[in-house]
Image (cartoon, grey):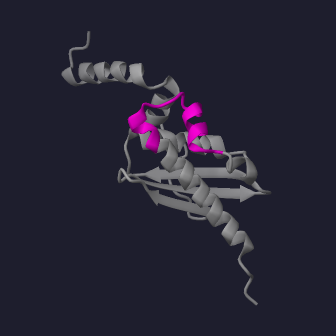
Amino acid sequence: MKNNFAEELQERIMLDLKKIYSAKFLNHWQHPQNWGIMNDAHGYGKITGPCGDTMKLSIKVVNNKIMKCTFDTDGCGGSIACGSMVTEMAIGKTIREARQITQGKVLQFCGGLPEEDRHCALLVANTLQKAIDNYEMRQYRPKKL
């Protein structure tokens, strides 16, 4: 038994969280992957959800494949974990394949979420789609003469 109250409390909290969330979800929450925003992104999306969390997502595309995907959020643990997981889901996918990443796919990838956290999966899926929209808009913008 730990003799530090804070460590014991944190351990109890983690045991409770493990009853609710998958190990994959908790790992992405505690150790988010691909955190940050690219300065040289080919596509960028930013959405503030109804809960007040803001999600930002950047993509870099080479030969129609997402080669790099990063995120940033001021949101809760659910937004952090979902943001991290979506970057992993998107990297290596073609634009067409990434268009298929929906709230449902995010929920499936993370092992499901309680009802009160499902909006995090929707927020990040929509933000990815907005980043793809931004990328496509930049591709079809008329060139200056």
Whether residue 35 appears in this view of the structure is: no
- Tell me: residue 26, above or below residue 102: above
Whether the magenta-drawn stretch holds residue 132 is answered as: no
- Determine which quarter of the picture holds residue 133: bottom right
- Tell me: residue 69, above or below residue 41: above
Residue 109 locus on image (x, y percent): 59, 33
Instruction: Name the outermost residue toward the bottom.
Output: 145
- Tell me: residue 24, above or below residue 121: above
Viewer-closest of 97 and 43: 97
Instruction: Name the outermost residue toward the top.
Output: 1
Locate the N terminus by quadrant: top left
Magenta-colored span = 101-119
Taking 70 as reference, is 95 left or right? Answer: right
Taking 47 as reference, is 62 left or right? Answer: right
Instruction: Name the outermost residue toward the front.
Output: 115
Taking 33 as reference, is 80 left or right? Answer: left
Residue at figure coordinates x 54%, y 35% from the top left: 107
Q: Main secondary structure of the magenta part?
A: helix
Residue 30 locus on image (x, y percent): 43, 34
Residue at figure coordinates x 41%, y 23% from the top left: 20
- Tell me: residue 88, above or below residue 54: above
Residue 81 locus on image (x, y percent): 47, 38
Residue 40 locus on image (x, y percent): 61, 64
Residue at figure coordinates x 74%, y 73% from the top left: 140
Count of labels in the image: 0
Viewer-closest of 87 and 99: 99
Whether residue 139 appears in this view of the structure is: yes
